[in-house]
């Protein structure tokens, strides 16, 4: 954290606005995501929590952020950090009812 604090201080002194990375949680219950749309800033993280009673496979094939979390069992969670700006369609590979959009701003 020492390096981060120093970088933040340098950014502050040079008049650059410092945006701290945020973390959001998106659940999966009854084969739907708890959010239809989430807006983030580049570098923010979503923790995908499986609070359902069946396994889910959260993934995206969008150019801005391709990922495949594999099978997430009930009660487990996996974080994803969105490093590029753009629109990301997040789906579950198993359940076609599960769709959400992540809008990542610069
Ligand atoms: Cu699913």
Image (spheres, grey):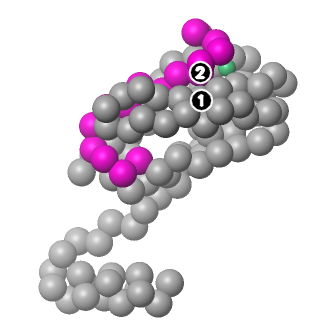
Q: Give the residues in magenta.
A: 82-97
| Residue 46 horizontal/vertical position (percent) | 53, 46
Q: Is mark 1 within 8 Å of ligand 1?
A: yes
State yes or no: residue 99 in magenta: no
Would you say 11 lies left or right of 59 here? left
State yes or no: residue 87 in magenta: yes
Q: Quadrant of residue 78?
A: top right
**Looking at the image, which residue is at 69% across and 39% down?**
49
- Tell me if residue 88 comes above or below residue 49 in the rendering: above
Ligand number 1: quarter of image: top right
| Residue 79 horizontal/vertical position (percent) | 59, 49
Give the residue furthest to the top: 96
Would you say 80 lies left or right of 85 here? right
Q: Quadrant of residue 96?
A: top right
Q: CA distance from mark 2 to mark 1?
A: 4 Å
- Residue highlighted by disc 1: 58
Q: Is mark 2 within 8 Å of ligand 1?
A: yes
The reply to whether residue 37 is visible in this rendering is: no
**Looking at the image, which residue is at 33% across and 82% down?**
8
Secondary element at tag 2: strand
Would you say 82 lies left or right of 85 here? right
Secondary element at tag 1: strand
**Looking at the image, which residue is at 20% across and 89% down?**
13
| Residue 77 horizontal/vertical position (percent) | 70, 44
Q: Quadrant of residue 19?
A: bottom left
Of marks 2 and 1, which one's residue comes earlier in the chain? 1
How many residues crowd mark 1 within 10 Å: few (<14), some (14–19), many (20+)?
many
Q: Which mark is residue 14?
A: none
**Looking at the image, which residue is at 65% across and 27% down?**
57
Q: Are marks 2 and 1 in contact (CB under 8 Å)?
A: yes
| Residue 58 horizontal/vertical position (percent) | 59, 29
- Residue highlighted by disc 2: 92
């Amino acid at each position: 954290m020492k390096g981060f604090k120093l970088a933040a201080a340098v950014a502050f002194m040079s008049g650059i606005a410092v945006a701290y990375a945020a973390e959001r949680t998106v659940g999966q219950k009854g084969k739907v995501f708890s959010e239809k749309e989430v807006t983030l800033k580049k570098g923010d993280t979503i923790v995908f929590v499986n609070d359902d009673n069946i396994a889910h496979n959260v993934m995206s094939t969008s150019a801005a952020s391709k990922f495949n979390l594999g099978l997430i069992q009930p009660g487990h969670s996996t974080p994803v950090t969105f490093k590029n700006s753009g629109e990301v369609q997040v789906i579950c590979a198993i359940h076609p009812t599960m769709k959400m959009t992540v809008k990542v701003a610069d």
